[in-house]
Image (spheres, coloured by chain):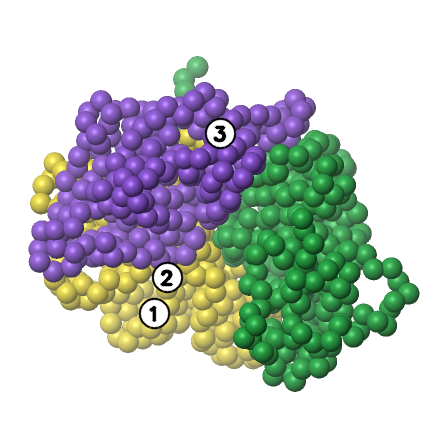
Amino acid sequence: MKIELVNRPGNTAAKVTLAAGETCTAEAGAMIAMSGHMNITTTTHKKGAGGIFKAAKRMLSGESFFLNHFDPKDKEGELWLGSSLAGDMLALTLDNENLIVQSGSFLASEESVDMDMGWQGFKSLLSGESMFWLNLKGRGQVVLSSFGAIYPIEVDGDYIVDTGHIVAFNETLDFTITKAGSSWLQSFLGGEGLVCKFSGKGTVWCQSHNANSFGHALTPKLRKA
Amino acid sequence: MKSEIKGSQAFSYVEVELAPDEVIVTESDAMSSMDADIELKARLNGGLFKGLLRKYLGGESLFVNHFSNPTNTPKKMTIVQGTPGEICHRKLDDEVYYLQPGAFIACSPGITLGLEFAGLVSFISREGLFRLKMSGSGDLYFGAYGALLEREVDGEYIVDSSHLVAYEPGIKLKLQLAGGIFSSLFGGEGLVTRVEGKGKIIIQSRSITGLAGWLNPKF
Amino acid sequence: MHTTYNVVITGKLAAGADKTAAINAFGALFKLSPEKSQSVFNKAPVAVKSNTDKTTAEKFYRAISKTGLECRVVDATAGDTPAVSQGQKDTPASSPAAPAATTDNDTPVTFKGFSYKIEGRPDYSFLTVEIPANETLKVEASAMATMDTHLVMKTKLKGGFGRFLTGESLFLNEFSAANGAAEIGIAPGTPGDLVHQHLDGQTLFLQNSAFVAATMDVNLDTKWQGMLKGFFSGESFFLIRASGKGDLWFNSYGAIIEIDVEDDYVVDTSNIVAFTEGLEYEITKVGGYKSLFLSGEGFVCRFKGKGKVWIQTRNAQAFTSWAHFFRPVKSKK
């Protein structure tokens, strides 16, 4: 499976080239276009494993209930994937490590990658993210999407990421909910409020923008519901 | 101040490196990530009264944030605006620069943020009664939804009111109809800003108003 | 004022052109080796003829257009494309006058196309068109962002009953340069890219909200897609059919990907921006009936034959359903 990301970071699309016999698993609704001979199967789970229960858990973590599996049958084929909002994508190769992914950021993966719902504790409620997260593990390539440009931060010690800006992080990192700077009052007056503090050693991938801030900027101009 | 604008025009963000004791002043909630050692102080911008004016009339927030580096090694942070779009850097050297409400993102402490009555023009075109007057010396970061394009004005030029972002002090704004009454009612252009004088203006290639105009019929 | 022109290759291909063949033809025209012409092409946008008069620029334009490379004539004083510096010896700026142009001296040379530039690509593309004196440009309603003060704007009712059903504005604006050439800046409401096509008899189909601007000899009409197709695909009932001669600009939501269809290709109906006439298209379901309702893909458009499809990397419905949650709530009556 070959992944090429085009038009980063504005309205990124992933071009996935599949050899005969390979399968790409993608979030429902992510397909933009594909070769005419591409075969598509829809399941609630990873091909050949899991079931309704896993799908329900996935839905709790902000992903869709269904997954689509694309295979080009007996000759090479291509597949274009997009996300629902404008933004960047990130392609990573997992080598038996665990990646914790913000709800809604999963876009596609190789068949060999396993996904499960993760629980980050009640702090998730305050993090501006969903309560549940996805845990990706196994070997193989994954594609994540974000609202905004994605930039990695190599944490070695403590680093602060504003709520609503986390895309994914290595399982070797832990985060706590805290304040920006040394004073709670200043953090709230300054509009920063709660932030996530990552500690340990590993990578956190951040998204430059926060979709909620953009949504609120649109509100005054939108037609009343 | 060391800084770099990244993320292309689509999703510009500013990566800032604060040297020891260095300070950057930002719009409220502009920080998206930072080293845990960086200190934050919220300040009323120019006193309570001016701060309130700025909030309610200038479309900006009551507080601005002063981020500082109390350690003795350089520390990194990233700053971003609320909407997607481009961020521009401009160095002021003891001069004045005007921003439309909402365009301010960050500056070095040598720049003063003021609020000025922008005339009835601005009010009628629904861009707010006031404009932000940036004066002094230092680094200024401002931005808007869309890409930012520079246009040189010498004489007169017409800009749709929702597309103007910033301009030099040599520029004056007037209001007029884009076409006749019929066109103004049905052509969707309505009132436009007539820019007069000599100097550079910055326009945004998309507007929130335009985006809403595209979205609203789809709901 | 505008006395000199640059001829610029844009780095794009004309509709339906083959890249290698076009670059080779371009090389033959300027007597360059295939490697050289490839390297010139890679530098695009690049001026292949700078600071020349209008007639010569037009000759170059006609000759280069025939190779299949997209090129345009720009005002040399506008400075939006890097002119070739003297040091770059491998560009054919000083090659002998366009040789191919001599073969059709019998046809009158007409200035083909308005000069234009696109900035802010690909996410917030902004179009600036130079309207020559006494010419008119039709522009989608509400899209004008900047203009010279002497442009005259008129609002016209768009033709066709179809307009009522496409969700588009019923009006479009015509901007006329009555008192000398004038510039207009156009910003569509949709965040995305812009594509320019010079029509010379061929026909393009556009998704109903993709139209941005066109010159007066481009005909726009709506095409009934049929009840069933339109209904199930969740898309509009109409396509805009653009034909005739002249410049046409259309836009997308998200970035644009050009797909050269060789035999068959499947595109989600909400990601179609435009396609060339001659392609067969059919709205079908993707996969089995289970996939139809559960996959989130619903109906797709299956293109067959040979031609070009422009697709967009995002779809408006997804954005609309997200934005719905941010709508203000109606105040109590």
Could you say which disc has been placed on residue A216 in the image?
Answer: none
Q: Is residue C276 visible?
A: no
Is the Cβ of the residue at disc 2 closer than 8 Å to that at disc 3?
Answer: no
Query: Residue B173: which disc?
Result: 3
Quadrant in the picture for residue B194: top right
Residue named by callout 1: A92
Q: Element at badge 2? A: strand
Counting residues from the start of the chain, the first of labels 2 and 1 encountered is 1
- Can I make out residue B121 in this image? yes
> Residue C84's image quarter?
bottom right
x, y (%) of residue C129? Answer: 64, 48
Q: CA distance from mark 2 to mark 1?
A: 8 Å
The chain carrying label 2 is A
- At horizontal 35% and vertical 48% (from top left) the residue drawn is B90
Q: Residues within 10 Å of mark 1 (few under 14, many from 20)?
A: some
Drawing shade for chain A: yellow
Q: Which chain is green?
A: C
| CB-based contact (under 8 Å), mark 2 and mark 1 | yes
Q: Secondary structure at mark 1?
A: strand
- Which class describes the residues within 10 Å of circle 2: few (<14), some (14-19), or many (20+)? many
In the image, the chain rendered in purple is B
According to the picture, the residue beneath numbered tag 2 turns out to be A144
For numbered disc 3, what is the local secondary structure? strand
Q: Residues within 10 Å of mark 3 (few under 14, many from 20)?
A: some
- State which quarter of the image contains the N terminus of chain A: bottom left
Looking at the image, which residue sits at the far top?
C333
Residue at screen point 55% across, 78% down: A76
